[in-house]
Amino acid sequence: MATKTDICNLALSLIGEELSTLTDVDVDNTKVSRTCLLHYDQTLEEVTRMHTWNCAKARAELTVIDSTVFGWNKEAPLPAACIRPIALTTDSSYYRYLIFKTEWVVEGRTVRSNQGENFLLYETVPTLANMDALFMRAFYTLLAIKICIPISGDRAIRTELIQEMESLIMPEARRVNGFEGYQSPIADSEWLEATLISSTGGSTSWQALSVGDIPM
């Protein structure tokens, strides 16, 4: 398993600073270590928000209370570890909708909806043990972009790293991430939804779907 220091050293290697290899980024009191620490946590959160990473997914039942904000009648605080909300449902068996949708919005650190029960799928910062290889590559590459100018001053290398991040690393991460699971295709169409409801006799229950139909 890679360590925090390993990730910083990988970032340094991308900007040609192999001679500045760190022994322990939390202990080494050098300009290089201080610069890495300055950007480390912020960069990790940014990479987590960039994509729906499978290695960063988490779930929680929210504590819903009545809202006094106009436009919505319920609200709930986001989990402290939530970096990016992905989906909200009123049923713990589902987070994707074929027929009935839950309207919701995030304002600050609050989820607003009109539902009394809310279950949230979200992204959280993955532990070092949970980071997959492509997440880690995106992380240390973005970290290298952040620390390149303060440490090496080489703008050409920084530009090359940005291009690699945008054209190679993130597209490949999205492609591979998309293969890790299967979900029934969704056609977001009110006409199709009405057709499905009609085919079930106008039922307004979840009986048209089963847990097996929508993998969690």
Image (cartoon, rainbow, N blue to C red):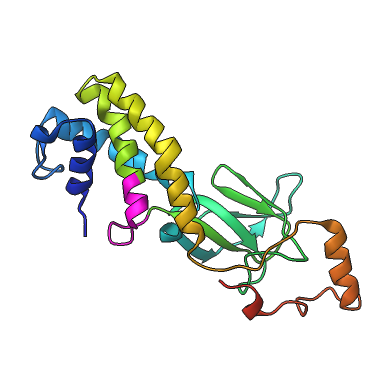
Percent of width and height locating residue 207 = 77, 80
Q: Is residue 119 above or below residue 105?
A: below
Q: Is residue 170 left or right of residue 153?
A: right
In the image, residue 133 lies in the stretch drawn in magenta: yes
Which stretch appears magenta? Answer: 126-137
Residue name at image x 26 percent, y 27 percent: 148
**Quadrant of the rendering where the N terminus is positioned:** bottom left
Residue placed most toward the observer, 152 or 79: 152
**Quadrant of the rendering where the C terminus is positioned:** bottom right
Percent of width and height locating residue 21 = 11, 38
Quarter of the figure with residue 38:
top left
Q: Is residue 48 left or right of residue 183?
A: left
Residue name at image x 38 percent, y 35 percent: 164
Asked if residue 29 can be seen in this view, the reply is: no
Percent of width and height locating residue 152 = 20, 23
In the image, residue 58 lies in the stretch drawn in magenta: no
Q: Is residue 123 above or below residue 146?
A: below
Residue name at image x 74 percent, y 66 percent: 98
Asked if residue 10 can be seen in this view, the reply is: yes
Q: Is residue 9 above or below residue 135?
A: above
Residue name at image x 36 percent, y 44 percent: 138
How many numbered marks appear? 0
